[in-house]
Image (tube, rainbow, N blue to C red):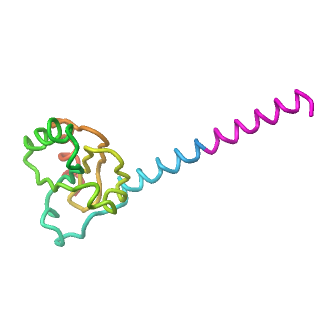
Amino acid sequence: MSFEVQAVALGLTGSAVGLTAMAARLTAWHARRRAVGEVGTSKAGEHPFSSAPHILYFTTEQCSTCRLLQEPALAQLDAPVRTVDAIAEGELARRFAIYTVPSTVVIGTDGTAANVNYGFAGTEKLRRQLAAAGDHS
């Protein structure tokens, strides 16, 4: 096989690998968008937090960022917060594509996810998201 044919074959293989990686990233992005816009956590009246926007806070026992940053930020909010162990409640974590902690999910009054924050989310950001989630009721 000539050098030119080998170079073209190698180039095509590289392009195929790149396209496969791009497709995987796009699939993950679509899954996150579905989790944010379409996946509800409860039906009205079924959950004690259903009448007001609230937060699902995903953490683990080993997460130092959770203890040092996220929990103090959440403590400053006037909104209900449900702490979720991302390992023990893995199915719920996967539902929102949570693969890092801390992560927070702002749930609107209609029971759907209004925002998903991967990593630390500050108090002001969460306040804005809660206010917007309450406006869509």
Tell me the residue at 81%/36% (across/down). 9
Which quadrant of the structure image shows residue 86? bottom left
Which quadrant of the structure image shows residue 121? top left
Look at the picture and state if 129 lies above or below 50: above
**In the image, is 23 to the left or to the right of 99?**
right
Residue farthest to the top?
Answer: 3
Percent position (x, y) of residue 80? 11, 54
Residue farthest to the right?
Answer: 1
Position of the C terminus by quadrant: bottom left
Tell me the residue at 38%/52% (across/down). 97
The question of residue 64 being in magenta is answered with no
Look at the picture and state if 84 lies above or below 76: below
Position of the N terminus by quadrant: top right
Percent position (x, y) of residue 61? 20, 49
Taking depth in this image into account, of 99 and 97 the one nearest to the observer is: 99
Residue farthest to the front?
Answer: 62
Residue farthest to the bottom?
Answer: 46
Percent position (x, y) of residue 102? 25, 43
Taking depth in this image into account, of 126 and 60 the one nearest to the observer is: 60
Look at the picture and state if 102 lies above or below 95: above
Magenta span main SS: helix
Percent position (x, y) of residue 47? 17, 68
Taking depth in this image into account, of 131 and 124 the one nearest to the observer is: 124
The question of residue 2 being in magenta is answered with yes
Q: Which residues are magenta?
A: 1-20
Give the tally of numbered discs: 0
Tell me the residue at 19%/41% (across/down). 66
**In the image, is 35 to the left or to the right of 27?**
left
